[in-house]
Image: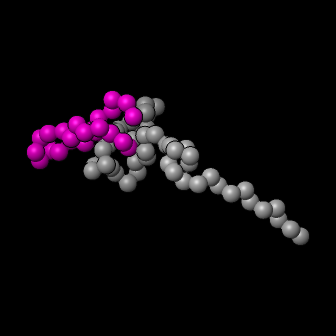
Amino acid sequence: MGDARCDFYDWTAHRSCNEPARWVTHQSSVGTRRERHYCDAHRPPRAHPMITLPATETGAPPAEPKPPKGR
């Protein structure tokens, strides 16, 4: 997952989370793109997983082929 750390900052306690990040958000503004990283505890609803594992690594069975459509 890399060295990314959680970007959440608690303004009331004046401290950052600094936990390993597992989620990322992408925001664009006037031609610039910014990534923000979050841990599980501070993940916003719009966040996406940083790494997507293939079905074989997640333990999910492989998808069955669809039967041909009959007429």
Quadrant housing residue 60: bottom right
View extreme (right): residue: 71
Kindly identify the residue that appears in the image at 21 percent across and 41 percent down: 17
**The C terminus, quarter of image:** bottom right
Magenta: main secondary structure: loop
Q: Is residue 71 left or right of residue 36?
A: right
Q: Position of residue 48 (x, y in %)?
A: 43, 46
> Residues in magenta?
1-23
**Looking at the picture, does residue 47 appear above or below residue 28?**
below
- Farthest residue in the bottom direction? 71
Q: Nearer the viewer, residue 67 or 71?
A: 67
Left or right of 65? Residue 16 is: left
> Can the viewer see residue 14?
yes
* Outermost left residue: 13
Location of the N terminus by quadrant is: top left
12 falls in the magenta region: yes
The structure's colour scheme is: one colour
Percent position (x, y) of residue 10?
17, 45
Counting every numbered tag in the picture gives: 0
Residue 21: say if magenta.
Answer: yes
Query: Residue 66 location, x and y as percent?
Result: 74, 60
Where 70 falls versus 36 (above or below)?
Answer: below
